[in-house]
Amino acid sequence: TLSKDGYADPVRLVMKRTSRITMRVQSRSGAGLVGVPIAIFSGAPGQLNFTKSTDADGRATFEISPSSEYGCFLVLAPGYAAMIAGLPVTMEEQAVEVNQAGGSIALEYPPPSASAYPMLGQGGCRLMPAMLAGFSRSRDKNLFPNMTPGDYALCLFSEVNGANIQGPCKSGSLAPYGNLKLAVELPGGGK
């Protein structure tokens, strides 16, 4: 809007690029899986952005923070092993192949508190076991019977002056149909 004399105060227009991750959840044969629930999470305690399901072709698109280089997802395809997937931000669609051969992960950790909360990680992604239990509908909040084989780490974190500080960790590899137990203690021996 211009004033009567034809001048306007300087206006600054800012354009922001949106970042998206588009994935196609598929079986080993390459068939897209319909209606697969996928949760995107930030890796910070208690922060879950949202959940959506794949479309008729097995695709789902998530908008993420423009400053993020990758997104972390929990893929829960019925009849397949649950998967924690870290996907880079790209303009290309990415295939996420789910596996039917899962294994069991048992976790032991001290009761969560502000000074020590557990996070289960795979790749560059991590989430609280309670969040995983809620989405996988596990009856035991510390036992996850059908997880994708791979390398996992259970770590205790604490928040100091707004920063997350990593404490003791235990890592291991889960084989197809195998069992993995990860246990961490507070410094000084407290579970």
Image (tube, rainbow, N blue to C red):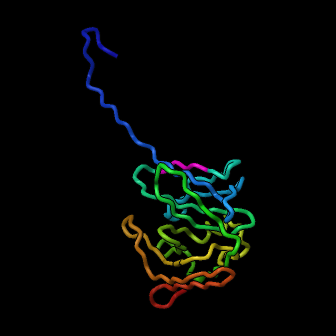
Q: Quadrant of the C terminus?
A: bottom right
Q: Position of residue 40 (x, y in %)?
A: 56, 57
Q: Nearer the viewer, residue 118 or 61?
A: 61
In the rendered image, the residue lying farthest to the bottom is 189
Q: Position of residue 111 (x, y in %)?
A: 57, 78
- Magenta: main secondary structure: strand
Q: Residue shown at 67%/65% (left/top)?
A: 28
Looking at the picture, does residue 36 appear above or below residue 144?
A: above
Q: Residue shown at 56%/82% (left/top)?
A: 173
In the rendered image, the residue lying farthest to the top is 4
**Count of numbered badges drawn on the protein:** 0
Q: Residue shown at 30%/27% (left/top)?
A: 11
Q: Nearer the viewer, residue 127 or 27?
A: 27
In the rendered image, the residue lying farthest to the front is 29
Indicate the quadrant where residue 41 lies: bottom right
Q: Position of residue 38 (x, y in %)?
A: 63, 57
Which residues are the magenta region? 60-64
Q: Residue shown at 66%/59% (left/top)?
A: 30
Q: Is residue 44 magenta?
A: no
Side of 187 relative to 137 (left or right): left
Side of 90 relative to 73 (left or right): left
Q: Quadrant of the N terminus?
A: top left
Q: Nearer the viewer, residue 58 or 12?
A: 58
